[in-house]
């Protein structure tokens, strides 16, 4: 079956702009999480969505937001971009069975803010 | 919240040697501990995981051990091969209930020299 798909793969934006990233989970996976990956900080949790509701949120400013649609696809939005937002943004989908929680990652969206 | 520390940050071994990466976690409620391998330019992929009701798990050349009392877990790779070269991330989560947030360590760059 198809894996987790993220679009676009690469983005270049200017400071102050906003950006929307998309994630299509594996079919049947209802939980979608987003992570920011940078060389110095590793993978940091942004938020997690399940059934169109945000269940968990990491320690990121309110400029970072997300949503999930009824087909489990998710988008994240970053407003008023800053240079420090340059990173690889990864989404991961998983089943919601407590005994089967493997997170499958997408290829990521590489965001560069100039 | 959960905090995961991972050591060492870089590890260089000769082909055929063993490699050990160690992680500690802070939240005693964490009960799921996956390890991810990320090759350069690729997505993180699960290589092995362990739950808190198990002390050790093996899969061919890789094994993970968990010490709940000390709140630490380790990845062991035996008979290392050049294709094991990658960044390895440990993570912890409370997979029960509604929390599917993974807290990651900052990663270990493993280099296997031929």
Image: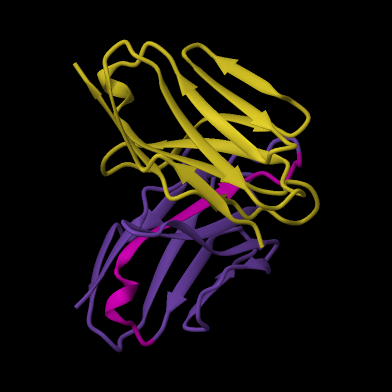
Image quadrant occupied by the N terminus of chain B: bottom right
Q: Which residues are magenta?
A: A80-98
Residue at screen point 19% across, 78% down: A114
Counting from the top left corner in percent of width and height, residue B89 is at 46, 41
- A85 magenta-colored: yes
Residue at screen point 71% across, 52% down: B27
Q: Is residue A65 above or below residue B11?
A: below
Residue at screen point 30% across, 86% down: A17
- A82 magenta-colored: yes
- Report the chain shown in purple: A
Please state the total of marks drawn on the protein image.
Answer: 0
Counting from the top left corner in percent of width and height, residue B75 is at 51, 28
Q: Is residue A32 above or below residue B70?
A: below
Counting from the top left corner in percent of width and height, residue A93 is at 56, 49
Image quadrant occupied by the C terminus of chain B: top left
Q: Is residue A38 left or right of residue B52?
A: left
Nearer the observer, A13 or B25: B25
> Farthest residue in the front direction?
B70
Nearer the observer, A49 or B91: B91
Q: Is residue A71 above or below residue A104?
A: below
Residue at screen point 67% across, 44% down: A95
Q: Is residue A79 left or right of residue B55?
A: left
Q: Is residue A56 left or right of residue A77?
A: right
Q: Colour of chain B?
A: yellow
Q: Is residue A48 visible?
A: yes
Counting from the top left corner in percent of width and height, residue A3 is at 46, 41
Give the quadrant of residue B7: top left
Give the quadrant of residue B63: top right
């Amino acid at each position: 079956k198809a894996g987790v798909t993220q679009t676009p793969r690469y983005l270049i934006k200017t400071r102050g702009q906003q950006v929307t990233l998309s994630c299509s989970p594996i079919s049947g996976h209802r939980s979608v999480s987003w992570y920011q990956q940078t060389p110095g900080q590793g993978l940091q949790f942004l938020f997690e969505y399940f059934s169109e509701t945000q269940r968990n949120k990491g320690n990121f400013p309110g400029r970072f937001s997300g949503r999930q649609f009824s087909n489990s696809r998710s988008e994240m939005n970053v407003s008023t971009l800053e240079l420090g937002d340059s990173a690889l943004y990864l989404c991961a989908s998983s089943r919601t069975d407590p005994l089967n929680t493997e997170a499958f990652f997408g290829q990521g969206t590489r965001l560069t803010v100039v | 919240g959960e905090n995961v520390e991972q050591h060492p940050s870089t590890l260089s071994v000769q082909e055929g040697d063993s490699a050990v990466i160690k992680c500690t976690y802070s939240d005693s409620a964490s009960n799921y501990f996956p390890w991810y391998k990320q090759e350069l330019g690729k997505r993180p992929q699960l290589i092995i995981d362990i739950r808190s009701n198990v002390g050790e798990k093996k899969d061919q050349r890789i094994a993970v051990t968990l010490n709940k009392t000390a709140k630490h877990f380790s990845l062991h790779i035996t008979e290392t091969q050049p294709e094991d070269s990658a960044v390895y991330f440990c993570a912890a989560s409370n997979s029960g209930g509604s929390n599917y947030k993974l807290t990651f360590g900052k990663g270990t760059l493993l280099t296997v020299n031929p």
